[in-house]
Amino acid sequence: MGDQEFPTTPSGYRQALAFLTGRGEVVGIGIEGTSSYGVGITRAAGEAGIAVFEVVRPERAVRRREGKSDPLDAYQAAQAMLSGRATAAAKSADITALRALHNARRSAVKARAAAQVQIRHQLVTSPADLREKYRNLTAARLIQTLAACRPSVHPDLEERLVLTALKSLARRHQSLTREISELDTELDHNDRKGRAPSTAPPRRWEHHRGTTAHHRRRQPRQAAQ
C-alpha cells in the first residue's frame, strides 16, 4: 500500500488515477462521500471505467487513536475495499443532480416560512389600525393583500414604513412560492421521465438526509491502493 497527495482538480484526478493504475490492476476504488465532496474523483474514475464504491468514514475509535488525517482516511478506504466491506456502488450523477433540486426546494421553503413568520411578528407590533385591518385575514389572503398595498398613500410615517417592510416580505413570499412551484415542476418532470431514483425523497418531504464527508475542499486529496 502507498499514498500520495493530489490537488482536487481535473488534472489532479487524472494524476490520482494514474497513480493507482500504475501500481497494479485496479479492481475498484473506495471513496467517501461519492455524491458530495468526493464527487469529482468519483466522476473521473467512472469515466475511466473504474468501479467506484462508497465507504463510510473511519471508525471513531480509530480517529481517537490515530487522529484525523487524509492519509488515514485513504488507507481506511483502501482497507474497506480489500476486506470486502465496501460493497455499495457509488451514487449516480442523477442522484446527485436530483439532490441539488431537493436542496434548492428545501431552502426556498424554509426562506418562505421565515418570511411568513416575520410578517406575523411585525403585525403584532404594528400600529393598532394596521394590526386590526389585517388581523382576521387568512395567510394566503394576507400575503396577497400586503403585496398589493400602497404604503406611499399613508401620511403617518410609522404606518408607511411598517407597510413598506410588510409589502417587501409579502412579495418575497410570493417570489419564493413561484420558485418552489418551478422546482416542483422540474422534479415532477424527472419523475415522469423515469430518471428520478426510487430512493429519492418524496417531492413534499422537506428534510433531506445527506451523506457526510470529511474533505477539505482546498486541501489535496489522498489516494491509496
Image: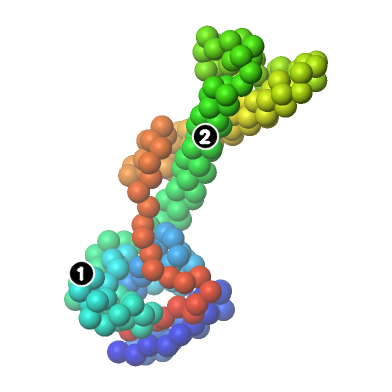
Q: Is residue 103 above or below residue 109?
A: below
Question: Residue visible at 35% across and 68% down?
Answer: 32
Question: Residue visible at 27% across and 72% down?
Answer: 58
Quadrant including the C terminus: bottom left
Identify the mark nearer the N-term, 2 or 1. Answer: 1
Q: Is residue 47 visible?
A: no
Under circle 2, the secondary element is: helix
Question: Residue visible at 40% across and 37% down?
Answer: 206
Residue 39 at x, y percent in the picture: 45, 64
The disc label shown at residue 52, or none: none
Q: Is residue 206 above or below residue 62?
A: above
Residue 67 at x, y percent in the picture: 30, 80
Q: Is residue 180 above or below residue 70?
A: above
Q: Amino acid at mark 1?
A: Arg
- Please tell me whether mark 2 or mark 1 is closer to you in this view: 2
Q: Amino acid at mark 2?
A: Ala
Q: Is residue 44 left or right of residue 143?
A: left
Under circle 1, the secondary element is: loop
Q: Is residue 74 left or right of residue 183?
A: left
The Cα atoms of the two marked residues, 2 and 1, are separated by 43 Å
The disc label shown at residue 114, or none: 2
Residue 187 at x, y percent in the picture: 48, 37
Q: Are marks 2 and 1 in contact (CB under 8 Å)?
A: no
Residue 78 at x, y percent in the picture: 29, 79
Q: Is residue 151 left or right of residue 38?
A: right
Where on the picture, by quarter, is residue 22? bottom left
Q: Residues within 10 Å of mark 2 (few under 14, many from 20)?
A: few
The disc label shown at residue 85, or none: 1
Q: Nearer the viewer, residue 160 or 103?
A: 160
Q: Is residue 34 visible?
A: yes
